[in-house]
Image (cartoon, grey):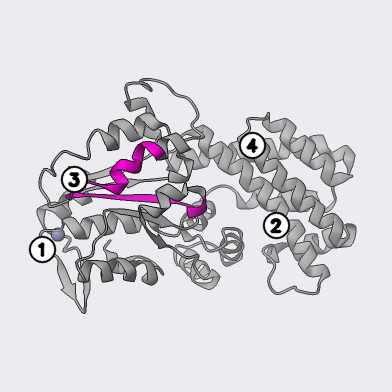
Amino acid sequence: MSLKQIYCQDRAIGILQKAFNQQRLGHAYIFAGIEGVGKYTAAVEWAKMLLCQDKIIENDFADSCGKCASCMLFQGQSHPDFHNIYKELYPFTEEGKNKKTALVQFPIDVIREFVLDKVSSRPSMGTHSIYVISETEKLNPSSQNAMLKVLEEPPAHCIIIMLCTSVEKLLPTTRSRCQIVRFGAIDKELVVDSLASLGVDKKQAIFWAGFCQGSIGQAMVWSGLEAYEFKRQLIQRLARIKLEDVLEITDLILQGTKNIVASWAEKDSQTSKSDLAKRVQKAVAQMMSLAFADAMKIEAGIVGDIVNADQQAEIKAIAGRFTAEQAAENIETCFQSTKWVDSYVNEKLVYERMLIELAK
Ligand SMILES: [Zn+2]
């Protein structure tokens, strides 16, 4: 992997390259964009290039060589001057030792011990120390405030890259101290093509590309989970939902989410299981919400652009059962339930409540 190979983010990479060419490298960056569009990969490749001892520069595009000692350390994920910071480091802090709590927020202890306490140390082999901090939208205001000084006056050798899903979720004081590089969503056709090239069935590839709305990373994850058959069943049941079916559909969802979380956890050992469970629960609400959005489109005569193109009969049935207004209310109900997921309401209750509303 190198910077050149980063998928469909030419604009963002171009901004970084320009700064590098003009020797105007910033010390604090925010890489902003929805999950799975390549922010982390770009940050790693950018760091690798900056630390590379034998950079390849062609047509004003600087890239890593892939062969020097520094690049080899990157390949082994053990470069001493590259610091990968994520909230799951909490159990490795003084305060969080051996604690296995679900983390909604990014603990300040991780920032303190893995960033603030270390930034002043000199790089061990390269010219820079690079800190990439994931999910910074989950830093609360006091954690962000703790970082302000370092963002404002970072040591000369230090580069901090904060990854976040939306800059609006960061404090204005944080934003104003960083250079913002935006990562855009990726064209649906390109996502479909790359899933298909990985061997994903075309119908499924089209669905996941639409479901993940331009996030190639998420589309790759979802198409590799045991989720598609579940989604088909869910939409089938939703098309015929009646009040007396609510308990049965709740069971289907609980079992389905459990299986999806298990298959996800097998592939991703870095993210905690409770975090994965929350993501899956939200995704299930989104699956339902998209079915109603599709039904609204069909009612409005827009058939070409629906996400559930693989289940048109079911979507038509939903469109036949609910008026556009009711469908819009159902989308709102699904959206509300994603908020309950974050506030630790019992999972079963969330689905029951949501389905009762939908079946009314
Ligand atoms: Zn190199």
Q: Nearer the viewer, residue 158 or 344?
A: 158
Question: Any mark on residue 54, and which?
Answer: 1
Query: To which residue does mark 2 refer?
Result: 290
Which amino acid type corresponds to the residue marked 4 in the rendered image? Val
Q: Nearer the viewer, residue 311 or 10?
A: 10
Q: Position of residue 360 (x, y in %)?
A: 89, 44
Helix, strand or loop at label 3? It is loop
Structural crowding at the residue carrying mark 1, measured as other residues with C-alpha within 10 Å and reported as few (<14), some (14–19) or many (≥20):
some
Of the two numbered discs 1 and 3 in the rendering, the one whose residue sits closer to the viewer:
3
Q: Position of residue 183 (x, y in %)?
A: 43, 63
In the picture, measured across the screen, residue 28 lies left or right of residue 277, that is left
Of the two numbered discs 4 and 2 in the rendering, the one whose residue sits closer to the viewer:
4
Q: Position of residue 138 (x, y in %)?
A: 48, 41
Query: To which residue does mark 3 refer?
Result: 81
Which amino acid type corresponds to the residue marked 2 in the rendered image? Leu
Q: Position of residue 203 (x, y in %)?
A: 61, 65
Mark 2, ligand 1, within 8 Å: the answer is no
**Which range is magenta?**
145-168
Mark 1, ligand 1, within 8 Å: the answer is yes
Distance in Å between CA atoms under marks 4 and 2 = 18 Å
Give the mark nearer the N terminus: 1 vs 3.
1
Helix, strand or loop at label 1? It is loop
Distance in Å between CA atoms under marks 1 and 3 = 17 Å
